[in-house]
Image (tube, coloured by chain):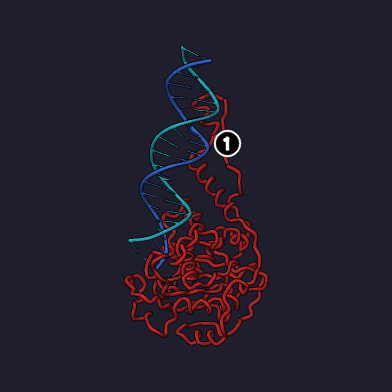
Chain colours: A red, B cyan, C blue
Amino acid sequence: MVAFPSLASSCLLLSSVIPEPGGRRRLGGSCSALRGAQNRGNKTRPISTTILARSTRKESKQSFKTSRHLHSESVESSIEVLKQSDLEHLKSLQCYNIPQKVSGVKTDWPATILVFDIETTGFSRRYERIIEFAVRDLMGGKNSTIQTLINPEREIKNAYVHGISSSMVCKPDIPRFREFIPILLQYVLSRQMADKPVLWVAHNGRSFDVPFLMYEFQRSKIEMPGDWLFVDTLPIARQLIDSDGEKLKSVSLDNLREHYKIPLAGSAHRAMQDVITLCYVLQKLTFELKLTVPQLLERSFRVSDLSTPRPGK
DNA sequence: GTTAGAACTCGGGAAACGAC
DNA sequence: GTCGTTTCCCGAGTTCTAAC
């Protein structure tokens, strides 16, 4: 396992990158004077570039959209109660790094940050299934990770992507997602700090990982805890500026790994490897963009902010 | 192959300006 | 005041980009 650097050392300052909510910014001064001199004398008019104006509008809209109040309602209030014997049975299924007991980590962080990734049988959250789940608590320590294969109960046609074949997961000793949920919930409870939210982090999570999770919870008829917050590193990475002063051409996880020269310590497109990569990327991103954990929380969203899955799927 | 958000392109309308 | 030109704003539509 790769030694994992603590994010705490790089968390963080003020953001000059996140736009102020609301106001439209205009270029005045020299630009205005220059164009005025060329075209129509001394009379001035608010001048802006189209690109800047459009960019600012979008940033502003996004900034407002993500602001919210945080609360610390217990997850226990919104999930089904499971028998202890069931939990013990589920733990015996083939999962590795399952936490055996509460770690008891306490910190000054304003949230528990869980970096996660999934592998699936395809792109459609409606018709495809999760086949691997990995999560790491950024705080580290004992029992800070979970990685498990998931039995999708269907043929896997995209094994060429992640190397996970039907023969590996379509077995009775591999948990189905509904069987894995109690383990996941127990893990989260073991990591969550009192009166502090849980912040899940994924790359392209808003469009991919979180909707998949949402659908799997719904198919399992178990309500996802309403106080879980999610943050997507993809739009954050789009703010990055390269050494030429331009935005990165690609903000894929692979490209970010190369951008930050993060070594690949395993098979790409396996959940835990991508989690490890994303942990490094998140550290670099937050440092480079001067993002604090509270600012990550401000950019977070809840499953209720996403479109609701159709019932009965 | 799916999906959703971001980024981009285009065109219409409005405003400001100069020329008449 | 009217007309033509230029520029900006804004919405709609299209394309791109991530994820497996």
Q: Nearer the viewer, residue A8 or A210?
A: A210
Please name the amino acid that badge 1 sits on.
Gly
Say which residue appears at 52% left-offset and 31% top-offset: A34
Please state the horizontal and vertical placement of residue A181, each as a whole percent of the image.
Answer: 51, 76
In the rendered image, residue A175, in percent from the top left (x then y), is placed at 44, 81
In the rendered view, tell whether residue A183 sits above or below residue A255.
Answer: below
Query: Which residue corresponds to the image point at 63% horizontal and 60% vertical from the top-left?
Result: A13
Residue A168 in the image: above or below residue A15: below
Relative to A61, residue A31 above or below: above
Left of A260 or right of it: where is A114? Answer: right
Q: Report the front residue among A293 and A174.
A: A174
The C terminus of chain A appears in which quarter of the rendering?
Answer: bottom left
Going by the image, does C20 lie left or right of A206? left
In the image, farthest residue toward the front: A312
User: How many discs mark residues in the rendered view?
Assistant: 1
Q: Residue at x 62, y 72 (%)?
A: A77
Q: Secondary structure at mark 1?
A: loop
Q: Is residue A208 left or right of residue A15?
A: left
Q: Which residue is mark 1?
A: A28
Q: Is residue A139 visible?
A: yes
Task: Give how far across and how far down residue A1 sits, in percent.
Answer: 47, 79
- Residue located at (52% from left, 41% from top): A53
